[in-house]
Every structure is written in structure tokens, then in C-alpha cells.
Image: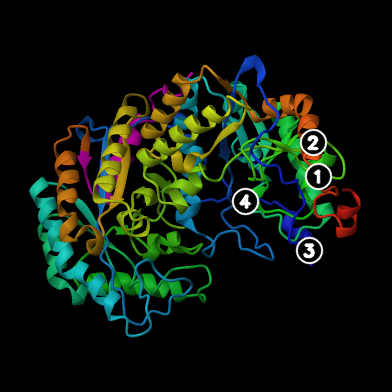
Amino acid sequence: MPVPDAYLAYPHRAYGSDQKRYPWRPSVDRVPIAWPGKAAVACMIVVPLEFHMLNPRGAPFKHPGAMVTPYPDLRHFTTRDYGNRVGVFRILRELKTAGLKATFPVNAALLPRIRPAIEAVVADGHEIAAYGLDTDHIHWAGLEPGVERSWVQATRTAFDRAGLRPRTWMSPARHQSFETLDLIAEAGFDTCLDWEPDSVPTPMKTTGRDVIAAPLSTELDDRLLLCDRGQSEAEWADQILEAVRFTSGEAPRLGGQVVGFTLTPYVSGQPFRTWALRKVMAQLAGDAAVWSATASEIAEAWLSASTRAQGEPRRNRAG
Amino acid sequence: MRSDPNLYDYWPYVDRPPIVWPGGKKLAFWIAPNIESYEFDPPTNLSRPGWPRPSPDVVSYSQRDWGNRVGHWRLMELMDKYGMRGSVSLSTALIDHHPEVIEACVARNWEFFSHGLYNTRFSYNMDEAQERAIIEDSIRSIQAATGQRIRGYLAPALTHTELTMDLLAEYDFWYTCDLFQDDQPQPVKTRTGKLISMPYSLEVNDVITFGSLGMTPQRYADVLKRHFDQLLEESQRSGAVMCIPLHAYLVGQPHRLGPFAEALRYISENSDDVWMTTAVEIAGVYRERYFDQTLKDISARGLATGGTGFAPIEAASAGS
């Protein structure tokens, strides 16, 4: 059976992007912006706090880090729980030592479960972001109408109940439906960590206010590099520092950009990785070109800097 | 279904007649930036959805978009620095979506070949008329945008039918990047035309090295240098082809471009015996000077089996 001829129809084949959330724009045509303190690179450290339940449905796919072996998979349950009990405190300690700021997306299900960890994050002045209900509530286009809105609202309610008012949203598995941005805007979120279409923040249109996408790099994800790809701690650390070095070198022409990466507590929080964590943090902290900031600080700084820069001539396209 | 596509004859990599590239160069070297368009909400082919995860896969989509918005310009600037032109493996529809990218490549006299229309539209299950439509659209659209009559093809997302090679040959394509059996070009056994397999490589393709094999940027740079050294050594006898297939959304990442630049610098500084060129130039020279020589050598060794790719078995045996 051949594919239907409709498979050869291209209704969005026209200038620009084939989606309506943000427009097409090459990096060489954007207006360069300056970060606070004239820093070249906004460094966005993201520490995801995830609840990996013992009995996930895995719909429409298994969340990265979900259970692997037949029930009850105590091995993976406790390995992930280790991150929320031990690893996260190791990361917090190193952040404090280096004087760096981070963003902590938290599954709503964890708010009551790991309250002392949440309090420690808040006490250290980091940003708490909402990270959906848990790792088994993946937002996607196949949900029944109304279900996703109820999940977003339940997430907001859970944070309200915990006395927290996050502005930043990250979806479980960073997956979305076609409506997710509208629903999170409706629930009062103005920054999102799911999209990475540019090396600077990108305003996304919604049915309400714009949501700013702060770019978090998949290719620098610690779980991907260290666990899935089996790279060494030294190799992982070098790549983060190289990204900062390279991006910093582009600043005179392209302005300030973002380097965003994750420190997953059950990965980067392992004792044998602490030395590499310290190396990365010490170098970032000692680099005058780096502005360590949280997702919403970066979104806000970008918004005000780009408003200021709008009037200036474009001068960054190479020959 | 066939157990062997019969697209080419077995041809051992020993005692082959020499190939010398223009200017007496030993190794032909080309770079293939894949400039791809992925749809936000592509339709499902009968055999495969557009994305592994349900649409919209905002991370995968936006990362690839990043390649066109950010990575491409970095990579192009680096290739300018070493005076290296690209042979662009193009998702043809990108001409409509992002003409700025096309104009920048045309301004640098880069070559274009077709990589289908979108990298989320697969050739699986297409009938002949449908596959012809894709090929004709590619020829027409790229000619209109760049003035180039394309001579090369890399099937979208490497999805093929049994007819793909015959159709390419019929439309006077000179080379296909879809076959990985050799480090030298070889005639492809098509019903008509004069099509060759162009060494392209999945082994040093950044999707494979970074994605499937999880290499670090330094390891990839090392792989490229060693690959280059070895092919250059072997090319003293008979010229091979080295291609670096790239995707800006991967190699253009800020932690990767520096080490990759080091590999290009190395190749550039050891290029006395290297023909820095494009795929279409390699194919042109090969078709003119070495196409018949290769067929003659295969025949003289008693290795010609006749027939054409995916033709009925009877035809294959009758032709030998």
C-alpha cells in the first residue's frame, strides 16, 4: 500500500517557521544584547528534582530515568531517591561554596515528600521552578481535552500549598502538547525550560502573555553525557567549560548568550563526581565573563536588555 | 524482497587501477553540511512517525531549529576561515522557509544536492509517481533558488525504495550518497544513465559519532585526523575520497566547534596531496575518466554479475 497522496502535501511550506510560537531569525541578524555587568555568558545551572515512582505507566513514553526492571524495581527507585536525599545536598554545598545561582525544577509530588531539600534550596537563594506533577504525568498532544489544564492547575495549587510562587516551568521529560505554552501562561508562568531554538532567550507567543524560553542544552545534559554516553567526568567538565569559553569568544560580535546545563542530583551528585563538579563551579565562579543566574533572572535581563537594544543598528553579520 | 540489492558488483580493495585526481592530487576531500528542515507536526508515513516521540517534540524540533539559526552560521564561518566549500545536503523545502541560509551558501559558491524535501518526510512506501515528484521538486526548486542543476542525492533520513537509484540515474543524477560500501566511487548498476556511489560515510558522520557512539568533541577530532591520514596514505596508490558529513545542530554546539576546528586546521595544513573540492566535481571527473576503467577492471577480474539493482533475478543472471 503506497502512502496517501496527502503525504506529499506541504501546507506550511513558506517563508519562516512552520509553527506560530516564535518567528524565524538567524543568529547573525539578531540585535546583540549585554548581560548585567557586561558579562559575555549567562550561565544557567538547572538542577531537576524528580519523583520516579515505582509503578510508572510510561505513557506516551518512559521518562528518562524511569524504572527499568520488573516491579518492584527497588534498584532504580532508590538510586533516583539517592539524588533527592544525598546528591542534591552535595550540589547545594558546592553551589554555595562557589557562590553560584541555580534553578531547581521540582515535581509537585516532591513538595511534601522532600520538604527539607526544598527549604534548603529556597534558603540558599536559588530559584524554584515547577516541573509538572511527577515523571509519570507527561504533557503531550494525545491527552483527553481538559486533562492537561487540570494537571497544570494541580501543579500550581501544589506549589501554592507549599507557599511557593514559581514563575518558571519545565515540563516532565521537557515534553509538551500543542497547548502547553498557553496553559502555563494561563497559570502565571512566564519562563520555560523546554525549548532551545536559540543561544539567547526566545519569547514564545501564547493565548495570554509571552512566555520566555530560556535555552537549556540537551547536548550538555549530565545524564545524557555521563550515563547514556558513558563519558568520563573530566570529559563532561571540559565540555561545559569549553562551551563557556567558545560562547564568550563570540560576545564582541554576537553579544551575550546563554549556556544552560543540568546537574541531575542522582548523576552529578555522586561522590566520585564531586571533584569534577568543583572544577566546573570554581572555573565558572572565577570567570569574569560569566554571569551566574537563574532562568527567570536570565529571561528578565534579556527582556530589558533587548528592549534597550532595539534601536541600535545591526552590526553582527560576517562578511 | 531481495537478499542483495545488486546495486554494485563486489570489487576488492586491492590492485585496483590507479585514480589520480586533478592536479596530480591523491586524496579527494569534501565536506557535506546537512542543512535540514524538520517539521513541527509532520504526518506519519505508514512505516514511521516523523519524530520518535509524539509531536510536538519541542526539544528535538527546537534543537534542530537551533542548527539553522545558530549552528549553521558558526560552521560556515569556520569553513570560510579554511577556504573550504561545502556540498550541501539540503532539505529542499528549507529554500522556502529559510532563504537567508541558501543565499549565504550561494554567495560562497557552495554546491547543493538534494536530501529530499523535509527530513520528516520519508520515502518508505512511496510509489514511483510519488518518488518522482520528490526528485522533480528537488531539481526544480534548487535550480530556481541557486541556478544549480543538482547532480547528487542523499535520500531524506536515508529512506529508500527499490526504485530510488534507477530514478536518480534516469533524471541524470551523477552521484548518490546513499551507499557506503567503499572509499572510492563505483558505478551503480542502474537501468539507464551513469550514476556513481559517492563515498560519504556514516562512520565519521557527526550524528553517528556524537549521537550513536557518544564521542566527545576531542575524540571526534582525533577520529577525523586519523581517518584523513590513513586515506591519504592509501591514496598514494589509487585516489580515495574522504567526506565529513556534518549537522550544524550537533557539530556547531559551543563545546564542539573548537575541537572540530582543530581537525580542519590539521587537514588544511597537510593538504599538499589533497584535492579540496565538492562532490559534484569529484563525480564529474570520475564519470569522465574512471567510470569505464572501473567497469573494465571488475569485468577483467570476472566479478561482473550483470543485471541492475533490484531487477528480477532472471535478468541479473542473464546479464553476466
The answer to whether residue A205 is visible is no
- Above or below, B115 against A118 in this view is above
Tell which of B31 and B297 is nearer to you.
Answer: B297
Residue underneath mark 4? B157
Q: Distance between the residues labelled 3 and 2?
A: 35 Å
Span shown in magenta: A291-319
Residue underneath mark 2? B295
- Mark 4 or 1, closer to the camera: 1
Contact between marks 1 and 2 (CB within 8 A): the answer is: yes
- Mark 3 or 2, closer to the camera: 2
SS of the residue under disc 4: helix
Please, what is the three-letter code of the amino acid marked with disc 2? Leu
Looking at the rendered structure, whether the residues under marks 4 and 2 are on a common chain is answered as yes
The residue shown at (72%, 24%) is B285
Magenta stretch containing residue A106, yes or no? Answer: no
Q: Earlier in the sequence, mark 1 or mark 2?
A: 2
Residue underneath mark 3? A2
Where is residue A69, by image quadrant?
bottom left
SS of the residue under disc 1: loop
Where is residue B219, by image quadrant?
top left
Q: Which of marks 4 and 1 is nearer the N terminus?
A: 4
Magenta stretch containing residue A297, yes or no? Answer: yes
Residue density around tag 2, few if under 14, some if 14–19, many if 20 or more, within 10 Å = some
Residue underneath mark 1? B304
Please, what is the three-letter code of the amino acid marked with disc 4? Ala
Q: Distance between the residues labelled 3 and 1?
A: 34 Å
Q: How far apart are marks 1 and 2 (CA)?
A: 8 Å
Please, what is the three-letter code of the amino acid marked with disc 1? Ala
- Above or below, B9 against A89 in this view is above
Looking at this view, name the residue that lies furthest to the bottom: A72
The residue shown at (52%, 60%) is B56
